[in-house]
Image (spheres, rainbow, N blue to C red):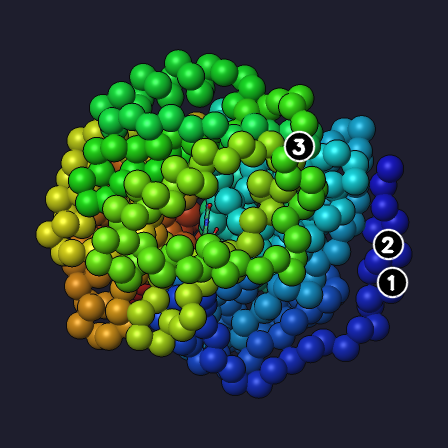
């Protein structure tokens, strides 16, 4: 069934453009306040085309604003806030495909597809993000046997700097497709995406504890080769990072222990938030987590819908306040054979800088099929680091020091680091981790010759940053 695309556009064509004068744009960490000249919230394609074609200065694009280093803004920019451009344009249940405006969140998309027993194929571990934000970082999750989000995208439409609308897919305008996905809003505005969906199935959670040294052989024998395992990650415990719990969610016909099909939007997270406080602030917090909290949580049998597990809410991680201390993510990728050696160095760096690590988890991703800014240049294990830092200037500088040490280590191990987080890496490190960046910038120079599409990431590494 195709939806009446034209109908949606007609219905919204006359909608007035929501505009806010000079506004401070920030992200969830509250570390990156950026004053932009104007924020517009388009609801129609025509409004986006007009803004892009006619705005004379820099343009930044905002999705859910969960990236953590100014990737959605820069000073004096017009920010196009995509969150109200969020309609479902087409749905073909039999082909398992959906076409959306990219300001839609995964959670809203899940509400639509769940009654048809379908799930998002690849997404992050939380559902608050917009599809456009996820495409533009080429996100990934805990899905086994998959890689970055790009592998589940059939096609996209982009508004380029001159206002032209271009359709791109792996077979048509392929360079734009592989540039815009993972392109952090540098090439144009993604205004439509067609995604391939998967079946919603029941998942049984299970776990095993083991030394890091055993994990790779366990992963390849028990996880990767087991077609029933849909989601998997491992939690590596600080401060030694030598013991882990590997958690899998496998397809099952067992009766549900969690009846809700989706995580309720109004769920209260006081327990999770309390646990986070214990882990981050109590003197024995890390031990309490490893020996008490995790075993207690994981021992409880759980059978839930895939869509329930995929619709988690970032509110469960939210502290009481981010004024003095804030919670931040980082992520590093290394080829599988380098896992133990990289973790060894990572542990040394984190201990040397007394980093307050709340969670370090391992995920797996297959190699990227060809995006210009691929973080998975080969098959990789991803190390996802969640930590607490002070908002004071001195600690921010120290975070920069140990981040650059970890980036160096990832590069030395043939790997990379993830770009939606704080922009601490040097331009040299960026180019070493992203060797096809020059192709990306050459494409940008062709489709955005005035360097209209900007944000703090591209100010640091892109055409302006290199001048
Ligand atoms: C608690 C938490 C958990 C996370 N977990 C994961 C995870 O499991 N996996 C993972 O991969 N990442 C994860 N992330 C990182 C997150 O996925 C990315 O920051 C993602 O981009 C967030 O989506 P967003 O809608 O907030 O995008 P934003 O932060 O708003 O934007 C991200 C980038 O996309 C660009 N952009 C947004 N919309 C468009 C558009 N329509 N056209 C062109 N460019 C656009 C922006 O300009 C910006 O450069 C996590 C972040 C947090 C805070």
List the residue tagged with mark 1.
10
Q: Nearer the viewer, residue 398 or 86?
A: 398
Q: Nearer the viewer, residue 303 or 354?
A: 303
Q: Is residue 42 above or below residue 418?
A: below
Q: Is residue 109 above or below residue 206?
A: below
Which residue occupies 25% across, 28% down?
212
User: Nearer the observer, disc 3 or disc 1?
Assistant: 3
Q: Which mark is residue 466?
A: none
Is the residue indicated by label 2 positioned so its CB lies within 8 Å of ligand 1?
A: no
Quadrant for the C terminus in the image: bottom left
Residue 197 spot, x, y in % from top left: 67, 34
List the residue tagged with mark 2.
6
Residue 307 spot, x, y in % from top left: 64, 40
Identify the secondary structure beneath mark 3: loop
Proximity of marks 2 and 1: CB atoms separated by less than 8 Å: yes
Residue 177 spot, x, y in % from top left: 56, 42
Is disc 1 surrounded by few (<14), some (14 to 19) or many (20+) residues within 10 Å?
few
Identify the secondary structure beneath mark 1: helix
Q: Is 297 left, or right, of 51 in this rendering?
A: left
Which residue occupies 84% across, 58% down?
8
CA gap, disc 2 and disc 1: 6 Å
Q: Which mark is residue 256?
A: 3
CA gap, disc 3 and disc 2: 41 Å
């Amino acid at each position: 069934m195709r939806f009446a695309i034209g109908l949606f556009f007609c219905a919204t064509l006359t909608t007035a453009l929501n505009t806010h004068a000079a506004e401070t744009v920030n992200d969830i960490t509250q570390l990156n306040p950026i004053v932009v000249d104007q924020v517009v919230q388009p609801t129609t394609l025509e409004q986006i085309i007009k803004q892009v074609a006619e705005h004379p200065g820099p343009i930044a694009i905002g999705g859910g604003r969960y990236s953590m280093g100014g990737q959605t803004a820069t000073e004096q920019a017009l920010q196009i806030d995509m969150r109200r451009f969020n309609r479902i344009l087409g749905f073909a249940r039999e082909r398992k495909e959906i076409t959306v405006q990219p300001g839609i969140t995964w959670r809203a998309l899940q509400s639509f597809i769940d009654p048809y027993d379908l799930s998002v194929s690849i997404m992050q571990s939380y559902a608050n993000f917009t599809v456009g934000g996820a495409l533009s970082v080429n996100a990934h999750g805990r899905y086994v046997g998959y890689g970055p989000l790009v592998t589940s995208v059939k096609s996209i439409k982009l508004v380029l700097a001159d206002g032209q609308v271009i359709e791109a897919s792996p077979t048509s305008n392929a360079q734009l497709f592989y540039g815009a996905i993972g392109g952090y809003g540098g090439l144009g505005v993604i205004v439509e995406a067609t995604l391939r969906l998967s079946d919603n199935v029941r998942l049984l959670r299970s776990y095993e504890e083991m030394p890091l040294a055993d994990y790779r052989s366990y992963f390849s024998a028990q996880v990767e080769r087991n077609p029933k395992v849909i989601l998997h990650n491992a939690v590596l415990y600080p401060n030694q990072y030598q013991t882990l719990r590997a958690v899998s969610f496998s397809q099952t016909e067992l009766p549900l222990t969690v009846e809700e099909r989706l995580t309720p939007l109004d769920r209260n997270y006081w327990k999770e938030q309390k646990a986070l406080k214990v882990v981050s602030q109590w003197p024995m917090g890390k031990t309490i987590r490893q020996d008490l909290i995790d075993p207690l949580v994981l021992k409880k049998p759980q059978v839930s819908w895939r869509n329930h597990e995929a619709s988690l809410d970032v509110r469960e991680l939210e502290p009481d306040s981010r004024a003095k201390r804030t919670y931040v993510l980082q992520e590093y990728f290394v080829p599988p054979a380098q896992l133990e050696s990289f973790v060894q160095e990572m542990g040394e760096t984190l201990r040397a800088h007394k980093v307050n690590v709340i969670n370090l988890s391992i995920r797996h991703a297959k190699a990227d099929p060809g995006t210009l800014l691929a973080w998975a240049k080969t098959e990789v294990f991803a190390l996802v680091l969640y930590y607490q830092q002070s908002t004071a200037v001195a600690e921010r500088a120290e975070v920069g020091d140990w981040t650059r040490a970890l980036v160096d280590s990832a590069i030395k191990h043939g790997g990379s680091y993830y770009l939606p987080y704080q922009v601490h890496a040097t331009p040299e490190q960026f180019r070493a981790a992203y060797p096809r960046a020059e192709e990306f910038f050459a494409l940008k120079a062709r489709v955005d010759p005035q360097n209209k599409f900007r944000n703090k990431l591209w100010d640091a590494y892109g055409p302006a940053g290199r001048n």
